[in-house]
Image (cartoon, rainbow, N blue to C red):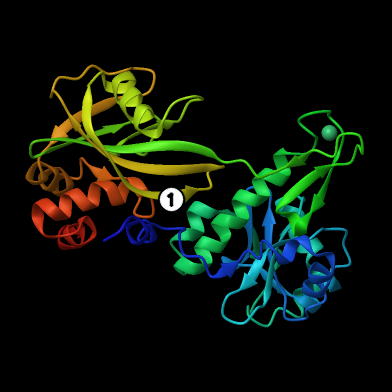
Amino acid sequence: MDDLHRSLLNTYTAQPLDRSAHGRKDPEWLAAQLADTRSEYLILNGHSIVTVNRVPLILSYDQFYALNSAMTPLLLGIKKTDGTPVYLVNTNVAEEDLSTLFHAIIDRLDNVKTITPESFERLSLRTITREIDPELASVYSYATLLNHWHITTRFCTRCGSALEIKEGGSVQQCTNEECSHIEYPRINPAVIMRVTKDDKILLSRQENWPENMYSVLAGFVEVGETLEQAVEREVLEEVNIPVENINYHSSQPWPFPNSMMLGYTAEACSFEFELEQDDIEHAMWLTADEMKQKMIEGSLYPSTEFSISHSLINDWFQAQTGITIKAFRSTIAV
Ligand SMILES: [Zn+2]
């Protein structure tokens, strides 16, 4: 399997939209998309997703314009299947005000049955990822990342003037004509690495994680280093183990709030470790059989299934045992 296809096995990597990089630069093309009555509008609220009875709220063209609000739709792209424009819209209201905001369109929501003011809820992407299909989860991941950038990037980083949305929202430009600096969406690269030695994997946990949840090590890439150097440095910093044979595994957009996870594998030069107590609460070397035993006892839960961390652990576990973690856990579920 090549790197592309290994990455596509990770969650948030399906991409049903064409971002239309060329079309966006053409105001006439953008206007034609805005006028397309097939358009769909994903409704976000800051870092949350607006849902109705736990179904993500996606408005039609008529519903969106019935809102009669000043909210600016940002173009995510057009559907590869039929060219339907898909927008994100950030509503900036408190949860209790959501039903008021959407009052005008409640009667027209034919995809949800009984609606009460309590039907409108803001849910995190983490929460709904398990409940929606992978393509939609990927679109919401992209929308969440873009929305985070728009929320946190309001002024020019060069001169401090206000920014205006350009190219449907994929860039913002400084309104000071002397400056005209263009701001592009920012993501923070982070390396995440599976460290193994012989037939053992190194798993660790942080204090604020759910009880008994374990993962592989990860950390942000620093200015001026390569990704491989970041892997080497992070493992040394967190558990004080030198590593070698550092190899790329796969990547995953990680919209919590704006990271790009770059997955690596590495071999430890020693089993001896020393914890950096500020970051890591507990770490342990485990064989696949020991992992199985701890999962049976309930003293180990590998990180959430939609994370690249899970993919890194699972690939190793499956190679060792011939079974996925999910399949193994289903045999012990009560
Ligand atoms: Zn400026």
**Quadrant observed for ligand 1 in the rendered image:** top right
Measured as percent of width and height from the top left, residue 136 is found at 53, 67
If the image is split into quadrants, where does the N terminus sit? bottom left
Quarter occupied by residue 85:
bottom right
Residue sitting at x 48%, y 26%: 222
Local packing at callout 1 (Cα closer than 10 Å; few below 14, some 14-19, many 20+) is many
Asked if 89 appears above or below 174 in the picture, the reply is below
Looking at the picture, tell me which residue is in the foreground, 191 or 1.
Answer: 1
In the picture, measured across the screen, residue 92 lies left or right of residue 79, that is: right
In the picture, measured across the screen, residue 315 lies left or right of residue 110, that is: left
Residue denoted by label 1: 252
Measured as percent of width and height from the top left, residue 324 is found at 19, 59
User: Which amino acid type corresponds to the residue marked 1 in the rendered image?
Assistant: Gln
Q: Dot 1 lies on which element?
A: strand
Residue sitting at x 37%, y 56%: 7
Specify whether residue 278 is in view: yes
Quick one: which residue is furthest to the right in this view?
177
Please give the count of numbered marks on the rendered protein.
Answer: 1
Looking at the picture, tell me which residue is in the foreground, 263 or 271.
Answer: 263
In the picture, measured across the screen, residue 98 lies left or right of residue 202, that is: right
Looking at the picture, tell me which residue is in the foreground, 199 or 292.
Answer: 199
Measured as percent of width and height from the top left, residue 47 is found at 63, 48
Asked if 121 appears above or below 32 in the picture, the reply is above
Q: Is mark 1 within 8 Å of ligand 1?
A: no
Residue sitting at x 51%, y 61%: 138
